[in-house]
Image (spheres, coloured by chain):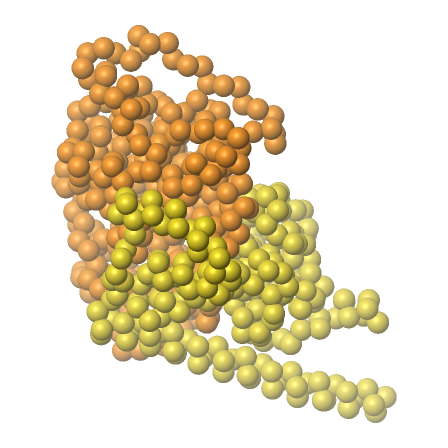
Chain colours: A yellow, B orange
Amino acid sequence: MRQYEAIHPRYETSPEVEKIVEAVSVCYQCGTCSGSCPVAPAGGMDYTPRTIIRMIQAGLEEEVLASETVWTCSACYSCAVRCPRDIDITDVMIRLRNLALIRGYPARTGIARKGKVYNVDFMKIVRRLGRIYEPELVIRYHLKTNPLNLLGMAPVGLTMLLKHKLRLLPEPVAAAGRSEVQGIFYRLEKEEARKEQEAREEGKARRTKGSGKERQE
Amino acid sequence: MKYAYFPGCSQGSTAEEYNRSLLAVARQLGSMELEEIPDWNCCGATPAAAIVSPTLPHSLAARNLSIARDMGMDEIVAPCAACYKNLRKASHDLNQNLELRAQARGALGDRELGRAPEVRHPLDVIVNDVGLDNIPVKKPLQGLRVASYYGCLLTRPAGGFDDPEYPQSMDRLMEKLGAEAVDWAYKTKCCGGGIYMFHEHVSFSMSADVLAHAKASGANVVAAGCPFCQLLLDLYQDKLGKIRKTVFNLPILFFTQLMGLAMDLDRQELGLEKLIVPPFSLLAETVDASSLGETSEKKAKPKPSRLKKWGEV
């Protein structure tokens, strides 16, 4: 049964999933990506990029989307420029992040969870102000993960303050521009939700049809 | 030539000296006129890509590209490596990929999206448009052995102004300024800036590798072109040294600051005082000493230490 599942994708398909699966379909597992990755040898990933790609090919949706790798890829494009099959692996990782969020997969490890909090909060601030405001990001992030770490940040914060490297007040985009930026977020969010809903319904319809067929046989 | 200028968020805070020195250098050069894009928004950096939609970074960038187009500009200069990569990728993709273009247009609402302007890095503009021969070097950086650090996003993804594996433009610029460009293996390695908030020990081990290799190649200063690389290597150098049980003592300057020094601009304008690892004693021993007449070449050059074995550094 396990074997069967590995060969036949268990994931709900959607245009987004199809794009990812198509992109990695030409991979011949040479491992250049894992060899080029600066994060994996430093111990920052639970699965190397090559493994993740193999897992996508095998249809292991849950394992891929709950992995640490999806969140800790530093998007340095080392793998993408070296891939002999011209797969934009960084782009695949970015798409996987998005999918993990939309499908609501809980992060498997503490680091993955922290990465998720950091990324989501970053964009919440950009959505509100149109630009990033670093002190708020740092404080929000630490309050949500481990508030005690804020104390550890104090010396660094003080150094930056003394060197005038900290923005004390946010410098948002002017009101008209801000609502434009918020509009971009709003429209894309709606569009994504619609696509995902459509894919889910399609999958449901296919499954009921499929099980009916099996019963007939 | 006139360029639309996209400073990016970090140019107002952590990398304020980058902004200041770039503008000072551009003013002096004359042939590089920068006009700020009014009311620009965040380019989306790397995290944006993950949230809401894979089209979000393109759409956020599209607003900036469209404003620059309204200004009548054909080219944008973005000094932050992350902004540069994001805007460049968006500009390229929006002009090539019709499906993506339609999605971004839908997200933009009423705003018109013409042909996206080309996005350039100041290093590209200085080396390829202004030209190395047109840089007025008044005070050669004698005695400085510079490790040019390109990081990830100055040259990647491929298709930019320099080779993604072994770029040369910053090295040639440093030689033109009178410094010695050291050859080293980590010039395009990632410093881990994108993940250091939530994966500190991994990103620190990555940046410590970069510093260790710069030091081993015999460099006494690192030139950076990315605010994140500079911040991590400079602000946390103490910590990185402790991890490797050494003291690096390597000033990390933006390449524009080094240009300003060689062009003998007012040092106040270059923001040298904002660096965490102070470059002043090094400058007094090298650049300033040689301009006073006592050439630093008389002093015996310290031999670059032997590159240690893999993993030993």
The answer to whether B294 is drawn above or below residue A217 in the figure is above
| Position of residue A99 measured from the top left corner of the image (x, y, whole percent) | 55, 70
- Residue furthest to the right in view is A217
- Quarter of the picture containing the C terminus of chain A is bottom right
| Position of residue B243 measured from the top left corner of the image (x, y, whole percent) | 53, 36
Left-right relation of A42 to A209 = left
What residue is rendered at 40% in x and 69% in y?
Answer: A124
The answer to whether A211 is drawn above or below residue A63 in the figure is below
Q: In this rendered view, identify the residue nearer to me: B155 or A87.
A: B155
What residue is rendered at 30% in x and 30% in y?
Answer: B279
Is residue A37 visible in the rendered image? The answer is no
- Quarter of the picture containing the N terminus of chain A is bottom right
Left-right relation of B86 to A19 = left
| Position of residue B258 measured from the top left corner of the image (x, y, whole percent) | 27, 32
Left-right relation of B279 to A103 = left
| Position of residue B278 measured from the top left corner of the image (x, y, whole percent) | 31, 32
